[in-house]
Amino acid sequence: MDKNKKNVQDLKDVTIRFAGDSGDGMQLTGTQFSNTTAIVGNDLNTFPDYPAEIRAPAGTLYGVSGFQLHFSSSSIHTPGDSPDILIAMNPAALKINLKDVKKNAIIIINSDSFDGKNLKTAHYDSNPLEDGSLDGYQTFKVPITTLTANTLKDSKLSTKEVTRSKNFFALGLMYWMFNRPIEPTIEWLNSKFGKKPDILDANLKVLKAGYYFGETAELFTTRFSVAPAKLPKGTYKSISGNEATAIGLVAASELSGLPIFLGTYPITPASDILHYLSTYKNFGVKTFQAEDEISGVTAAIGAAYGGSLAITTTSGPGMALKTEAIGLAVITELPLVIINVQRGGPSTGLPTKTEQSDLLQAIYGRNGESPVCVIAASTPVDCFYMAIEAARLATKFMTPVVLLTDGFIANGSEPWRIPHVDELNKFEVKFETNPEGFYPYNRNDLLSRPWVKPGTPGLEHRIGGLEKANIFGNVSYDSENHHLMCNLRAQKIKNIQNEIPDAEVIGEHKGDLLVIGWGGTYGAITEAVANVRAQGVKVSQVHLKYLNPMPKNLGDILKGFKNVLVPELNLGQLSKILRIEYLVKTISYSKLKGLPFKSIELQNKILEIVGGGNGK
Amino acid sequence: MENKIDVAEVKLTAKDFSSDQDVRWCPGCGDYSILAQVQRTLPDIGKKKEDIVVVSGIGCSSRFPYYMNTYGFHSIHGRAPAIATGLKVARPELSVWVATGDGDLMSIGGNHFIHACRKNVDLKVLLFNNRIYGLTKGQYSPTSEKGKITKSSPYGSVDYPFNPLSLALGSDATFVARSIDREPKHLQEMIKRAAEHKGLAFIEIFQNCNIFNDGAYSHLTEKETKMDNVLVLEHKKPMLFGKNKEKGIKFDGFTPVVISLEDGKNSINDVMIHDEFDSNPIRAFILAHMTDDPALPTPIGIFRQILKETYGGGVQRQIDEVTEKKGKGNLEKLLFSGNTWVVD
Ligand code: SF4
């Protein structure tokens, strides 16, 4: 190489955060960097974090959008606790994010944006680039806006359009710094802007300018390399939880032979599932964007009655609106998949932020004794498998199944070793067609009632929300019958225990401390437990994917531990259920900040409980 | 040897459509007649019994499915149009009917109703309009007249009522009709024409609740008064009414007025000719609002019907088009699509 040859430093893992205005394209920059990093073969985990406002006023603190990405040469589970590198496109982005980064972190700053107006909007009294605020960090001031404008001085684009492409400068610079190829992004730009040659040309130029700036500018003396991770053999792609959910549903349709009907209403952060499914029309997928949440779920119930794989997707407030209809699906015993991509509540709450506070709502939140099956996905990739599982259990047990995911795993992404179709288990769905001895509530040995498609001759019958007579299915107000039917419906859900895997214990089966979690906190808990175990502390872990019913062996597992720590992004909902169901004393560890757990927070809590004394 | 029974050609009758359940409406309720007319008409709509589904919400009228020996779904308050939409979109070959009341459809289910109309979902919606809440024992409904004294409005209701036909027309329903429980032949005709319509068909049926709102429509149903108060709309026919069809409706600009054909001032040529298929909805609106004016007769019949792509038709067309273009979906290909990389 030339005289500008720079040092290359090997790193095991790196956490980068891109931060800027919500209009600065940080999500796109982060996604491109992630996709390229995946192709290079690192394990990775991402955390997009953006405001509810689509285009908040420029330069404001509340308009800051961030994208954090953790990549490594070994297996990882979280988007990283604190960034090693922060790219701050404006003062607000610096102000919001500086407190999170590591000591001595690299901070790359778009120095052009640190002018009087932006500093004021970000509530800076003095310029942090000059007042010593950044002492102790490796700060690189790069006039990104100017360099972008210079690159495009001959372009026909407007100043606004020119400025808008500056995120590609930052991306190019990061590609250089981390030794990543720029070709995947070039390819993506070609496919995205093929029809807008001016914009395509500008973005390509700026991307390359960013890359070459790193190479030629004397500012940077070191670049980094993160070797590929040793992942199991196979074909991989990077996938987000919402996309995995959508593809999982298509897979479930194929594995069961049932056509998909999705009845839904747009809501953050669940809408992407609708977006994906609406593109799969050649799989026969029917998506119905309803007039409201209630119509979304009831249309799905109508489709379930018609014999479809019926799905409704939503987030907390929408789940609240669907409550009565879910009760209808319970009493009519129709299979229905309900996906709640949880976000901060109550009410409208924090639409774009993650939380796990809808667990009690999912299990108990209906009038009457109204049991449903509740399961949860633990990682972006797991959404694929749990979507299939939701469909399997719903159709096998003729019941609504609530699949809980959350904003963190729905928007976050990780590499997925893609399974072949023949590695996935088919599940058989039988429709009743024989009028001989047919009754709508005649149950099989699982206690499931027959599924009959309208159009089947000789099986005409009526279902509905009024209590029905056992077996025969006519309206019944009989007191004994209602008592029996409530018990049968409850027992049917309990029977699902026989169909689901036992809970697995990571670590010893007996001891001082069990850490038990559910859903999207899997990564942080797993990393925390692994880290303290690596220090020789004896602590075990269980992560629940089945919340109602819970695995059969869970009671015995809990009995084996002196302390049970339950970290949750709520005020202790699983903790409460464990106390009620298993009469164990639990230690609830809560966080309600619209953010995932950091593994260090959990490590500290674990060490506090075991007294920091290596588990004895 | 085997017994060969030819089932295909069995002609069904009204009896085939009645279930084994005891009908539990109050004796004298207008719902009985509506049930009977539906049962009499369905054998003639060219559908097999098993391909017919009746969906309902909550209220007296919503017990309807239990008395029909077809597939039926008695659901929750207001949601029948949405449930029926899901069923119809999932299973386009079925004939899907909604039995609903003024509380169910105009109040709690109003949103689903207007959107089912707007989308032209191929449903047949029968609104049993008795202008009262029956099942909850007599509160005013969204179609009760202003000032109505009921259990929940002891000093008279201060609400203005909905005009259901106007609401349906305003939501671009493609078939809008009205009939009366006490006009069995007319009602049968409306049901049949609704069944034939491709798209959302809405029939407002004036129904007497003899317990909580008796006589709400007596001026339209009693022998002495009905001829002077009911205008039967017929396609391509002049709008005539009265005991001897001696009165007609003339349009004075946008205002309908009653004219006499006996006073020598007007002739039959002045009388408005009804056109069900008018592409402009204005006249249908004017006809719908005649109900609000005591000086004018109340029209029944088909106010408007037009043809346009149904919602389900559009959904299927897109599926066909995309499948034609991209080929039938292949899961293996979908899984391995996008930016993939191989680890060996
Ligand atoms: S309350 Fe009125 S509408 Fe209801 S069944 Fe009795 S008469 Fe009919």
Image: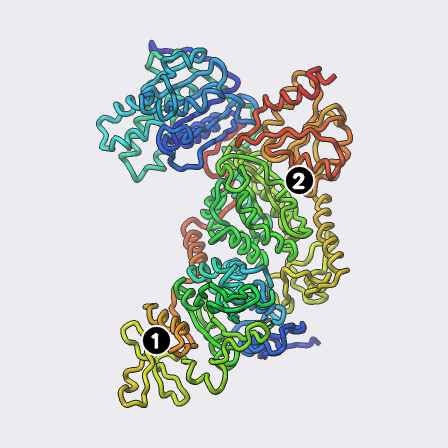
Chain of the residue under the numbered disc 2 shown in the image: A
In percent of width and height, residue A12 lies at: 53, 17
Q: In the picture, which quadrant includes the C terminus of chain A? A: top right
- Residue under the point 72% across and 60% down: A442
In percent of width and height, residue B106 lies at: 49, 63
Total marks in image: 2
Which dot, 1 or 2, sits closer to the camera? 1
In percent of width and height, residue A276 lies at: 47, 44
Q: Secondary structure at mark 1?
A: loop
> What's under tag 1, amino acid-wise?
Asp
- Residue under the point 33% across and 23% down: A113
- Residue under the point 76% across and 57% down: A484
The answer to whether residue B95 is left or right of residue A396 is left
In percent of width and height, residue B164 lies at: 45, 67
| A117 or A276, nearer to the observer | A117
Whether residues under marks 1 and 2 lie with C-beta atoms below 8 angstroms apart, the answer is: no
Ligand 1 resides in the quarter of the picture at bottom right
Chain of the residue under the numbered disc 1 shown in the image: B
Q: Secondary structure at mark 2?
A: strand
Which residue is the extreme one toward the top?
Answer: A3
| Residue under disc 1 on the same chain as residue under disc 2 | no
Label 1 crowd (10 A; few <14 / some 14-19 / many >=20): some
Residue ID for mark 1: B275
Residue B213: which numbered mark, if any? none
Q: In the picture, which quadrant includes the N terminus of chain A? A: top left
Residue ID for mark 2: A546
> What's under tag 2, amino acid-wise?
Tyr
